Image (spheres, grey):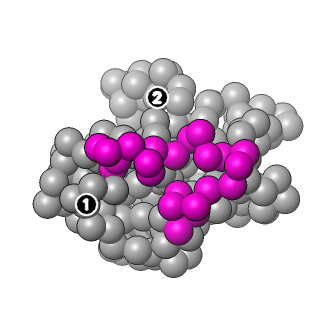
Amino acid sequence: MIILTHLHWDHASGLKYLSESRVLVQKSELDFSLCPSEKQERYYDYKSNDSYLNGNSFELIKGDYSLSEHANLVYLPGHTPGSQGLLLEQGDSSILIAGDAIPLFENWYTDNKRINGIFHDKNLFIETYEKIDSLATQVLPSHDSFVLSFFENEELNEVSRKVKSYFSKNMGVI
Ligand SMILES: [Zn+2]
């Protein structure tokens, strides 16, 4: 299973090297990627001959979607119209793999949270941050190299171990 947080080229282009996978993406994201706004056109790879669209079939999601008792796709519009994250929950703890909704730890773990400077809809993005605040006790950003040390930490909590477990079962989130 592959979960696409969104279809910007730096997250989705590698899909052309994979096949016969269950690929989950928001319908609104796929629609937008085929006809992006002028402001976002350069971030999508839909015109090249080896586009991520070639040969792949998507399972289109609309809004929040439950994968299992402890794993949910969460709709996070703002950076793009159809951004989504993967929320893993266990007990009172939860962790969100946020995609570019939260690119760096400093976007989230500061006194004044800062949205990604690349956005489709700023107001929606602010609402998304409020949603994340209500859902997740921890977040994993998409472009922060310190994420790797999170996975190497000897004192990983139960939720973090759950993330590793999901990855080991052939799930990819890009
Ligand atoms: Zn992006």
Is residue 95 shown above or below 60?
Answer: above
Whether residue 31 appears in this view of the structure is: yes
Going by the numbered disc 2, the residue's amino acid type is Val
In the picture, the quarter occupied by the N terminus is bottom left
Residue occupying image coordinates x 44% and y 51%: 46
Q: Which residue is mark 2?
A: 147
Q: Residues within 10 Å of mark 1 (few under 14, many from 20)?
A: some
Most common SS among magenta residues:
loop
Q: Earlier in the sequence, mark 1 or mark 2?
A: 1
Is the residue at mark 1 in contact range of ligand 1, meaning its CB lies under 8 Å from it?
no
Mark number displayed over residue 56: 1
Give the secondary structure at mark 2.
helix
In the picture, the quarter occupied by the C terminus is top left
* 77 left or right, relative to 87: right
* 114 left or right, relative to 143: right
In the image, the segment drawn in magenta is 31-52
Q: Does 99 lie within the magenta span?
A: no
Q: Position of residue 109 (x, y in %)?
A: 70, 34
